[in-house]
Image (cartoon, rainbow, N blue to C red):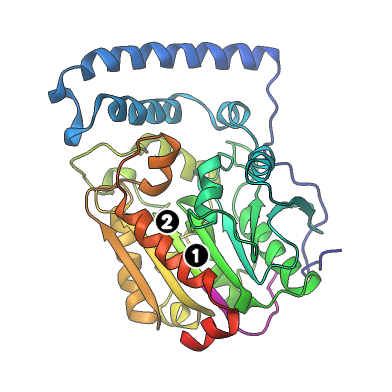
Amino acid sequence: MAAQAAGAPHRKHRERPVDLGLGGWLLTLGQALWITCILLGEAVKGLLPRNRQGGASLYEHLAYSGVRSYQGRLSPARIQNLLPSTATTCRRFARRHGIRHSSIKLDDGTVAHQLGPSDATHRVVFFHGGGYMAPALSTHIDFAFGFHPPRKHVAVYVLQYSLVTETANQYPLQLQQAVSLLAHLIHAEGVAPSAMTLVGDSAGGHLLLGLALHLRHPNPRVPPLSFKGRFAGAAVVSPWLNLHADPEDMAVCERQDVIERRAVKRWAANWLCGAPSDCWNDPLTAPADWWADVPIDGVFLAYGEDELLRDGCAALAEVLKTAHRSVAAYGVQGELHVQMIMNRFLRLNKPCASEDIYARWMQDRLAAKPAQRDART
């Protein structure tokens, strides 16, 4: 049984709070058909290269337009019902790679998924992106494994956090769930923090950063986590920062990103639900000494220089390099939001510098024995 963090409520957490009925499905399919018609118009316009930004191919132009259209025109509940659940995605990944999959029911009702052996020497704890409102994608799991075939000594734990709608699962629920998973690994499974690498992209990167600050400076609305030692590492890619900022103040880029300003604004409002800025939902406001206190040995950060969230990521890079003793931060020219994940998910098959850098960093963290890695960092 997982160790219950003091003060955590006993409840059952469903990943998606709303199941569509027949009427909801008919409306959703109608909207999807309308979006398809819009994309057909984009395809016609995209036949002229001048209508495509940044020298994109016609396929790339349509792929990004499609993602933006679904984000902007479908509600969170409709997106959640259209996409496979995180549980389904994890089961499919395990079958495809012939590895062990098990679901873990935490004491607070949260579910996590373990992919890999129970006796692994290295554990990756993964927080997926998706604006806090979408489940994990298949390429998210590849990302958690460092874009490397599953290793016999590595297990990945995917937090199936509760997804946000306009009326359900707002802040700080996902932070509570992340703490619950770490409490289970440390106290119920006896995993040392030095054997754990924390990984997150986009909203999952935002969650990871709030969790990192919570480890030494607990959020008063979330149970503290008791542990000894330091975590092996943390990797954040295109973290979603500045949730309280006006999206119109975000980076102005020459290329249209895979995410759009209206959608980002709506997702932030849904998740915050009027909560004021604090150091856990707005990590860039945390004091410098809080970042120096973060009990994580090595930190990796990558983001695209052409992405909408660039400015917040660049500010985080400066904060981390000033306050933390071991940081590898990269702003990659010509790349968009979570380029390494979208490149594979949309089957763009383009060279991706950020993926190469991230895969090497993960290889270094996961190849060595924990004691050797600790000595090196």
Determine the residue located farthest toward the right in the rendered image: 1
Residue 25 in sight here: yes
Number of the label disc, if any, that sits on residue 239: 2
- Looking at the rendered structure, the kind of residue marked 2 is Pro
Q: Where does the N terminus fall, quadrant-wise?
A: bottom right
Q: Position of residue 319 (x, y in %)?
A: 34, 73
Label ID, residue 331: none
Question: What residue is at 68 percent from the left and 73 percent from the top?
Answer: 224
What is the count of numbered marks?
A: 2
Image mark for residue 209: 1
The reply to whether the magenta stretch includes residue 222 is yes
Mark closer to the chain start, 1 or 2: 1
What is the x, y in percent for residue 150?
A: 59, 55
Residue in front for this viewpoint, 30 or 300: 300
Q: Is label 1 in a helix, a strand or a loop?
A: helix
Magenta part of the chain: 221-233
> Between residues 303 and 266, which one lies in front from this camera angle?
303
